[in-house]
Image (spheres, coloured by chain):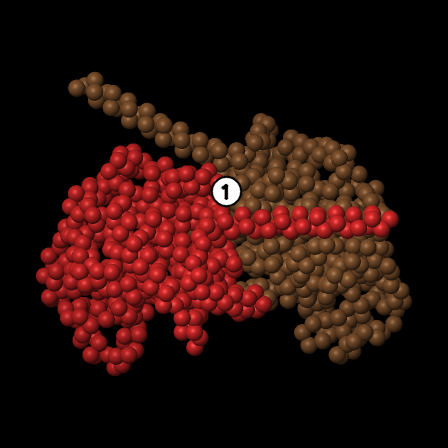
Chain colours: A brown, B red
Amino acid sequence: MRLLSITLLCLHAVLAFDYQAKRAKIMRDESLMSIGGQIELTDKESNVNNCLMQHKFQEVDYGFSNPQYYNFSRHFFSYRNIIPKSKAYKIIRDMPKGGALHIHDMGILSPDYLLNITYMENLYVCFEKRDIKLLFANKTPEAKCHTTWQLMSEARNNSRNVTKFDAALRSHFSICVNNPDVIYPSIKEVWDAFMGYFKRVAPMMTYRPVWEQYFYDALEKFRKDNVMYVEVRSVLINLYELDGTAYDQLITAKTYQKAIKRFMKANPDFIGAKIIYAPARNVDRVKLGEYLQLAYRIKADMPEYFAGFDLVGQEDLGNPLVEFLPQLREAAKDLNYFFHAGETNWYGTLTDENLIDAVLLGAKRIGHAYALPKHPSIVKEILENDIGLEVNVISNSVLALVHDVRNHPLSLFIAQGLPVVLSSDDPGIWEADPLTDDFYVAFVGVASRLADLRLLKQLALNSLKYSALGVKEKDLAIAKFGRQWDDFVNNFDCSRYDQ
Amino acid sequence: MRLLSITLLCLHAVLAFDYQAKRAKIMRDESLMSIGGQIELTDKESNVNNCLMQHKFQEVDYGFSNPQYYNFSRHFFSYRNIIPKSKAYKIIRDMPKGGALHIHDMGILSPDYLLNITYMENLYVCFEKRDIKLLFANKTPEAKCHTTWQLMSEARNNSRNVTKFDAALRSHFSICVNNPDVIYPSIKEVWDAFMGYFKRVAPMMTYRPVWEQYFYDALEKFRKDNVMYVEVRSVLINLYELDGTAYDQLITAKTYQKAIKRFMKANPDFIGAKIIYAPARNVDRVKLGEYLQLAYRIKADMPEYFAGFDLVGQEDLGNPLVEFLPQLREAAKDLNYFFHAGETNWYGTLTDENLIDAVLLGAKRIGHAYALPKHPSIVKEILENDIGLEVNVISNSVLALVHDVRNHPLSLFIAQGLPVVLSSDDPGIWEADPLTDDFYVAFVGVASRLADLRLLKQLALNSLKYSALGVKEKDLAIAKFGRQWDDFVNNFDCSRYDQ
Ligand SMILES: [Zn+2]
Ligand SMILES: [Zn+2]
């Protein structure tokens, strides 16, 4: 009888062991499959990781116990300002993050930077009902103005209160508001504001000296944010001089080349930058033909700086890729594609199908791919063809695809180990960091509570792996990154983040 | 030269054909993989489908072109009242939907039904600051009251305005509000209101005659909503009589049996109902042991009416299943499990891990499984073990897991062809239909624009396939459903939905 009891006890123990083993295997399999799950940390990296995770757990566990104070379930604008207090954030800010592969020409720098531009000479302003127009010129512009054009310097001098004047001006250079859920009740209102920004600032920004300096300063900002490589998408608007001279779009592309060369000379530790020509998608086939011709010209003119081609604009409103198939299939022989695709909440619409065509057209990377999890066949193609997914969590949140970022598909991409790169889209327009804010929100708000430094390291490495860098360039880039990473790890001091 | 051109032209045509073939294959593969994708519609079903899809396309395409007026990106409370105008809704309402497998004892019927109960004799009320207490008794209750207990009939008579009195009373029986984003800024506030409902109404509802009638009337409501089978989860509170006599919890279970028998006698076309014993999860192991003992007693007493066991309550706050492993593994030999698991936005927390234990404990179905897409290994287990997923979209939206329902994981479950059943959780508390509203939101708001009657038919069939019905019962149920379905299809008249 006693023997039987012992046998039963043993049996129970064996079964319990079996259960726990199965459970552990599931957890381990999921961890191994997830992005960064295969990385093994060195002792020094583990040291960083322990510090990082201690702070991450604090934040996550506080939110878990106090969901009414949890930031990431709310709009980015409601917690944007307190992010810099987070210690996990500070560590991520100091961490080398590799490259930013999905950003747009006029969306990188902050409203303060744009406000500074308005202090330049020869800027004219036209104050209209709710909007403003801006233009550099050596005489009063003839462009339409429902009131009158005046020199910005004079308008500012004539204002009773320069601080107020500048604050009002600055508000035109950002879409941040205190009550986003009221001001932007749907995707329409926020996209209207977002497109309004580009329309408003483009005439000021395309003044040649401004455009040239903007990208140089953008690179500077990225470098300070510990991002050492950039691929910028640009609509490549024609630049102009004070006297109204307008340049060919190729000159706009060459401006990037010039800025990059100048920046690399001053900052040899930087990896570099390339451009993706990304004009508006809401056009007809004739216009698309012109786009492609320009793309060929740029490629011929500056092959090392030209990464490829994309189409931009609110995807639901623009033409789907399928509309341009014959042309895009033909051009695929010569151009690398980095299509925005599936930046939508719609399922089973033509917009949603852009994911299929992006993959079939041989895209090297896909911008957003927000709708991807609804397409298991495309997920397979993504994995088989190792197509990079450029994820921009804050952008998707601000531009009304998702409210609580824990519902962002990035969590699934991470879980399934998809080839993700994190980027920031247009951080200046919502007053976010060049890249750190996006890394922070993704790491603390979207990824598993258990996801650690290995995820961050893999994301940084992915940003080089899936870049448009050539084979040799890539080796150099990874070597440069490795040195930065080692510096970060070797000089890491957890106590620095204590205050 | 001419021959060469022709050859090239042909080559292009062949390549274009190849592209389109690949594209079509991806679309077809995804359609076949999705829920209902294997169903072939009869001519008469196609007739229904054409009508249904015409109305669905109208709604979806209007929303696509006018996102600022799109309902499903907003809170359910903002469009709840206009749903009945939708023609797609009306068709789905008339369609046989099979069974509802995830609903809770006191959450089924509307506030109007509860208001009616307050017209019964012997109901006492205690009006406190913001809340009310309710109790049936044959003399003034001794239970705590910060003001005074009075007979509801007298309170109502003494009120100056019965309409206002009843409206105020009714508001305690629903969590619907006009400004949910303000009143319920986070999951905490809405869960507080939700739990407040149960606490408030339980003392009124557990008066034996009320409890008995409630479930009978609930079945009636389901039947009118073209739902012919129900599995109800109940905490099985002790019932009482006017003189304070309290009954054993087994009696509460037997009340269900009684109501079901009575209802089946009056409605032989109905398929039936079973109960799942689902007490609060926020308890210790001793209490869990008592739960399991009661489950055994019910099973022994009424095996045909007892489906199995579950644990309920806000999952993030309750104990995770792993806490109870030894007991639950032991009881798994005798009890079928239908665990709530993964009803959470958290990733990598103990709550999230409930999905692992639910599967390893051999659950027949899982309640919500909202967090499932983050767990590829569990998805595999779900498919291999054919575990039903009880999805309640409106519940998840109202209870603050997701804002824009297009982000609900149901879209991924549908895409991957997972074993989904749709249910409604506590439709009375948010004033939704017993089941049609949930079908409507899932079909028009969550599923692909292209998802059609085949999806709906499969979901209805799944609700029987994944039910706790025995083998023979299931055959009978599917036969009954088939007759109802044929009736619906044969008598379908699209023009009926025109006005
Ligand atoms: Zn973009
Ligand atoms: Zn439930």
Residue A265 point in image, percent of width and height: 83, 42
The reply to whether residue A394 is visible in this rendering is no
- Relative to A125, residue A108 above or below: above
The foreground one among B295 and B163 is B295
Q: Quadrant of the C terminus of chain A?
A: top right
Q: Quadrant of the N terminus of chain A?
A: top left
Apparent side of residue A478 relative to residue B6 in the rendered image (left or right) = left
Mark 1: which secondary structure?
A: loop
- Relative to A433, residue A465 above or below: above
Residue A233 point in image, percent of width and height: 73, 52
Q: Tag 1: Cα neighbours inside 10 Å, few (<14), some, or many (≥20)?
A: many
The quadrant in which residue B66 appears is bottom right
Residue that appears at 77% across and 76% down: A145
Residue B359 point in image, percent of width and height: 37, 39
The foreground one among B375 and B462 is B462
Residue that appears at 47% across and 32% down: A28
Q: Which residue is mark 1?
A: A448
Residue B185 point in image, percent of width and height: 45, 60
Apparent side of residue A231 relative to residue B284 in the rendered image (left or right) = right
Q: Chain of mark 1?
A: A
Residue that appears at 54% across and 69% down: B62
Apparent side of residue A353 relative to residue A464 in the rendered image (left or right) = left
The quadrant in which residue B432 appears is bottom left
Task: Specify the amino acid type for callout 1.
Answer: Ser
Residue that appears at 64% across and 47% down: A359
Furthest toward the top, the residue is: A3
